[in-house]
Amino acid sequence: GARHQEITKDLLGDGIFAVDGQRWRHQRKVASYEFSTKVLRDFSSVVFRRNAAALARKISEDAEANLSMDIH
């Protein structure tokens, strides 16, 4: 409502969490594209590959140095 918008405007501007009605619907529609199944799947694949590669490097380095690794 209006009181909520008054309180949050400085922090959140006119974003999805600070507006109502038609402005909220527009913000939600725009944001929905960024949270589609395909976008989330593609992003999580990139993050997984990056972290898997970093883990593989670390395991390889520790193995070459004959170091143990605590995995839990």
Image (cartoon, helix red, strand yellow):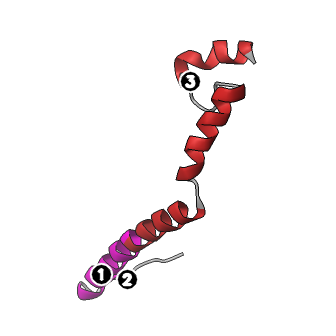
Crowding near pointer 3: few (<14 within 10 Å), some, many (20+)? some
Question: Is residue 56 left or right of 33 when viewed as pictured?
Answer: left
Q: Return the x and y of residue 19 as percentages of the image width and height.
A: 65, 25
Image quarter of residue 57: bottom left
Q: Return the x and y of residue 29 as percentages of the image width and height.
A: 61, 43
Q: Which residue is mark 3?
A: 14
Name the N-terminal-most of marks 3 and 2.
3
Q: Quadrant of the C terminus?
A: bottom right
Q: Which residue is mark 1?
A: 62
52 versus 38 height, above or below: below
Q: Quadrant of the N terminus?
A: top right
- Looking at this view, is 72 or 17 the one in front? 17
Q: Main secondary structure of the magenta part?
A: helix
The residue sitting at 32% across, 76% down in the picture is 58
Pointer 1 with pointer 2, Cβ within 8 A: yes
Q: Return the x and y of residue 49 as percentages of the image width and height.
A: 40, 74
45 versus 19 height, above or below: below
Q: Which mark is residue 68?
A: 2
- Looking at this view, is 16 or 50 the one in front? 16
The residue sitting at 59% across, 63% down in the picture is 37
Mark 1–mark 3 Cα distance, whole angstroms, equals: 50 Å
